[in-house]
Image: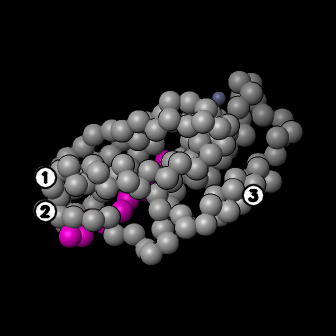
Amino acid sequence: MAHSGKFPVRTSNHMEFVDITDQVQQAVTGCGVTDGICTLFNPHTTAGLTINEGADPAVQSDLIGVLKKMVPPDYPYRHLEGNSPSHMMATLAGSSVTVLIEQGRLRLGTWQRIFFCEFDGPRNRKVWWKILHG
Ligand code: ZN
């Protein structure tokens, strides 16, 4: 059996990590699924999804700082929209994550949160999700 849907993510900065864990848990709770897996998919080409530490916001700003160092702004990109670094970062972050569901809760590590990674904001974004269960 599967349940699926989507939820909006509004970003307010050019680069930003938005904690979407509560929205994902709401989707799980709304389905009444107690045991299964939840896959999240980001349908945008200049954004990503990742799981990382949520307790210290310095981790998110460090990730943004390191991604900016990793992706050269002055590379001779052939994509001339002006947002090529954002496309590069989207691939580095990846476009989906999967989380286990046990006892009706997302089974994340103690310090883990799920983040929508904005690399070309601010924009109105969305995340698609599907829950599979027995
Ligand atoms: Zn582009």
Q: Position of residue 131 (x, y in %)?
A: 25, 53
Magenta stretch contains residue 97: yes
Real-space Cα separation, disc 2 to disc 3, in angstroms: 40 Å
Closer to the camera in the image, 120 or 132: 120
Q: Are marks 2 and 3 in contact (CB under 8 Å)?
A: no
Q: Position of residue 41 (x, y in %)?
A: 41, 46
Disc 3 marks which amino acid? Val
Callout 2: helix, strand or loop?
loop
Crowd around label 1: few <14 · some 14–19 · many ≥20 (10 Å): few
Closer to the camera in the image, 56 or 34: 56
Q: Are marks 1 and 3 in contact (CB under 8 Å)?
A: no
Split into quadrants, the picture shows ligand 1 in the one at: top right
Which residue sits furthest right? 74
- Tell us which disc is closer to us: 2 or 3: 3
Q: Quadrant of residue 57?
A: bottom right
Closer to the camera in the image, 119 or 9: 9
- Is residue 28 positioned above or below 11 on the image? below
If you read the primary sequence from the N terminus, does the residue marked by circle 1 or circle 3 appear first? Answer: 1
Q: Which residue appears at 13% of the width and 52% of the height? A: 1
Q: Which residue appears at 71% of the width and 24% of the height? A: 81
- Circle 3 is placed at which residue position? 66
Q: Are marks 1 and 2 in contact (CB under 8 Å)?
A: yes
Disc 1 marks which amino acid? Met
Disc 2 marks which amino acid? Gly
Q: Main secondary structure of the magenta part?
A: strand
Classify residue 36 as left or right of residue 59: left
Callout 1: helix, strand or loop?
loop
- Circle 2 is placed at which residue position? 134
Q: Quadrant of the C terminus?
A: bottom left
Real-space Cα separation, disc 1 to disc 2, in angstroms: 7 Å
Magenta stretch contains residue 77: no
- Is residue 111 positioned above or below 3 on the image? below
